[in-house]
Amino acid sequence: MINQFEVIETNKMVEEENLDVRTITMGISLLDCIDSDLDECCKKIHDKIYESAKDLVKTGEKIAKEYGVPIVNKRISVTPIALVGGACCKSSDDFVKIAVTLDNVAKEVGVNFLGGYSALVSKGTTKADELLMRSIPKALASTEFVCSSVNLGSTKTGINMDAVRLMGEIIKETAELTKDKDSLGCAKLVVFCNAPDDNPFMAGAFHGVTEADRIINVGVSGPGVVKKALESVRGESFEVLCETIKKTAFKVTRVGQLVAKEASAMLGVPFGIVDLSLAPTPAIGDSVADILCEIGLEYAGAPGTTAALALLNDQVKKGGVMASSYVGGLSGAFIPVSEDQGMINAATAGALTLEKLEAMTCVCSVGLDMIAIPGDTKATTISGIIADELAIGMINQKTTAVRLIPVVGKGVGETVEFGGLLGYAPIMPVNKFSCDAFVNRTGRIPAPIHSFKN
C-alpha cells in the first residue's frame, strides 16, 4: 500500500524536481498485415494500428490527470517494417509508401512518434532490408512522426560491416534531404548493436518479433529527482551516495509501474516492461550531466566522469529491478548532447569531446546520442564512428547506439537548434584522419569468443 508520506513525496518530485513518465509506448505486431499487394498491406497496417491505438492518447491524459503525474509522450512501436514489407515492396519507393501510411495513422491517433521503420541486419542483409535502408532518407524527409532504426550488430553474430558502410552513406543522404531543417531527419534515425525488442524510447523503438500481438511499455525518467536527492548527501561516502541513488531509482520506478499497470488495464493490452532510463531534457534541472557534477565533477567530461557514470548507471538499475519484476528496454542513464543542458555546457566549455563520450558509453545504457557534427564529415568517417561504438556493445554484451547529425552547411563552433525535447547542440569536432580502407573492406566482423555459450 502507498502511505500518505509517499504520496506527498511523489507530489514533490513531480512539482519541484521534473519527475515525469516520459512515454507510454504501445507495441503493435504487424506480422498479420503482410500481403503481396502493396495497397492492401498499407490498408491492413493503417487499420491494425488505428484500432489498437485509437484510445492511447486519451488514456494517457486520463491517467496523468487522475494521478497527477505528467505523461509527456504517447508513442507507438511496430514490427520492423523490412519484415512486413518484404512480400510487397519491390523498390525503395514502395517502402516510402508504407512510411507515409505510418505517418498518416500516427497523426490520426495523435501520438508524438511512431517507431519501427526498421531493419535487423546484424548478420546479413536481405533484399527487403537493403531496400528499406536505402529508402530511409526519403522516408524521413517525407514524414513527420516516423522514426527509423537499424540493428547492425550483436554479441552473438558480430558486426555487419557492409551494412555499417551503407548506413554511413544513408545518414549523409538523410542530412542532405532534410538540410532545410538543419538535417533534422538524422535526429529520427539511430543504428544499434544488440537492440532490445521492448525499448519504449525513440528513435530506437520497434516491436520485436518475440513480443505479444500488442503490449504496453512505459519509460519513466527522473534526473532532477536524483540530482535533488544527492544534494542532501554532499561529501558523504560512496556507500551513502550509492544507497541514495538506489532508493531514489526505486521510488521513480514504482511510479512508472503504477502508470503502466493502469494503462494496461484501461486499454485491455498486456503490460510489458518499465524502462527506467534517466532521460534528460533541455529543461533546467533535468540533466544527467548535472548529476555527474553533483557527484563531484566540475563538468561532465572531467577526469572521473566514466567512473561516476558507471556508478550512477549501476545503482539506477539496482533500484529499478527491486521496484518491478519487469524492468526492460534500455534502463540506465542516457547521455545525449543536444537534449541535456549540462552536456551542452560541457561540450561548449571543451570538457566533453566525442572521444570522451565514446568512453562513457562503455558503462551507460546507450551510446553516442544526438551529437551534431560538421556537415562535411565523410560518410566513411561516420561509418568508422559507428563501427567503434558497435564494437563496444558487441564485446561488452550490451546495447550501444549511434545517432549522429551531420548538419549540412555548418561547422565546428556553430550551434544547431532542433527545438522541443530535441534541444540544441554545438557542432562537435570529428577526428580528421581517414578510415576509408578499413570501412571499405567487405563482410562482417565476427562475433567475439565469449559469444559461444550454447
Image (cartoon, helix red, strand yellow):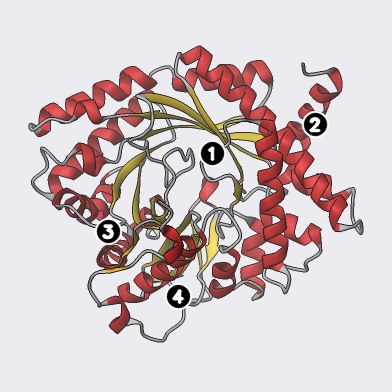
On the picture, is 94 further left or further right than 201? left
Residue, disc 3: 177
Distance from Cα at disc 1 to Cα at disc 2: 26 Å
Residue, disc 1: 328
Q: Residues within 10 Å of mark 4 (few under 14, many from 20)?
A: many
Q: Give how far across and how far down residue 13 sits, in percent.
A: 76, 34
Residue, disc 2: 12
Toward which corner of the image does residue 196 lie, by quadrant? top left
Mark closer to the chain start, 4 or 3: 3
Q: Are marks 4 and 2 in contact (CB under 8 Å)?
A: no
Distance from Cα at disc 1 to Cα at disc 4: 38 Å
What is the number of the mark on residue 440?
A: none
At horizontal 77% and vertical 46% (from top left) the residue drawn is 245
Depicted 240 relative to depicted 144: above or below: below
Distance from Cα at disc 4 to Cα at disc 2: 42 Å
Distance from Cα at disc 3 to Cα at disc 1: 35 Å
Mark closer to the chain start, 4 or 2: 2
The secondary structure type at the circle numbered 2 is helix
Q: Do the residues labelled 1 and 4 touch (CB within 8 Å)?
A: no
Mark closer to the chain start, 1 or 4: 1
